[in-house]
Amino acid sequence: MKPIAVIALKEIQEGLRNRWVFAATLLLAGLSLSLTLLGSAPTGHVGAAALDVVIVSLSSLTIFLLPLIALLISHDAIVGEMERGTMILLLSYPVARTHVVLGKFLGHVTILSFATLVGYGVSALALVISGTPVSSQSWAAFAAMLGTSVLLGAVFVALGYAASSLVRQRGTAAGIAVGIWLLLVLVFDMALLGVLVVDQGRLISSGVLNVLLFFNPTDLYRLSNLTGTNVSQFAGMAGLAGTVHPSFVSLLAGMAAWVAVPLGLAILVFARREL
């Protein structure tokens, strides 16, 4: 475990030196604070609890922004070091290649977790300071949103590592990262919606839809935060919540699998790669 911790600390120090940590934290804090202060201004008084509105807003923001940040900081984690020649120097020390991948992954997830918890925590702090009443149920939903946001970030860091281990040029890894973001954040849901409209329930039952949603980690994140709680009615997810029925634990297990598979692929490919 010590080599993994040392490499993770090195990644965090490089993130601090390159201002990645500060930039991501300020970006998330600025956007979340703006959403909190604006609140229900566009729609007036909607009878919703303030923190529930914040959860819906931040969940929608997370689906688009956090995967992009995760892919930006991870897509050249392996191929970038190989291009610069620093990977050979790193492997000259008594560390295994598996330790390198796991250490760098842990460092990047730590950076992303810090940015997410501090950035989104500003919203909760603003509500507390303003004296806004918040129920225990809303606090629990907010805590679940923070945890699943970190997990979603870890999914896309792992996908970035898989891309970084498969190619020999940073430019190619960047192109793959953009393609992954477009496919999983934008294209998949639009294609699935089109299929559902055309099918009209003839072939795709609710059971099949449950399975299809597990092919996209952003859908698992959306289901875990915007359905099954009192925020679903404000997020426009009440209809979907009545159609699909995966449990919260199965959604977390699905997201964990999305971390394990690409990270395992990155370890396997990098272990067999010639420097």
Image (cartoon, rainbow, N blue to C red):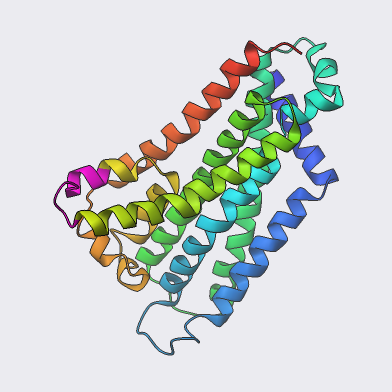
Task: Name the image quarter holding residue 106.
Answer: top right
- In this rendered view, identify the residue nearer to me: 252 or 85: 85
Q: Where in the figure is residue 81, as x and y percent of width and height?
A: 79, 27
How many numbered dots are placed on residues in this image? Answer: 0
| Relative height, residue 92 to residue 54 (above, below) | above
**Residue at x 62%, y 38% (from the top left corner):** 176
Q: Nearer the viewer, residue 246 or 143?
A: 246
Q: For the point 78% across and 31% down, which residue is it?
A: 10
Q: Residue furthest front?
A: 198
- The answer to if 7 sits in the magenta stretch is no
Q: In this rendering, would 138 be left or right of 244?
A: right
Q: Residue at x 71, y 19 (%)?
A: 3
Q: Which residue is drawn at the image coordinates 64% and 57% (left, top)?
A: 118
Considering only vertical position in the picture, is 1 above or below 31?
Answer: above
Instruction: Name the one closer to the observer, 80 or 113.
Output: 80
* Residue stretch rendered in magenta on the structure: 200-210
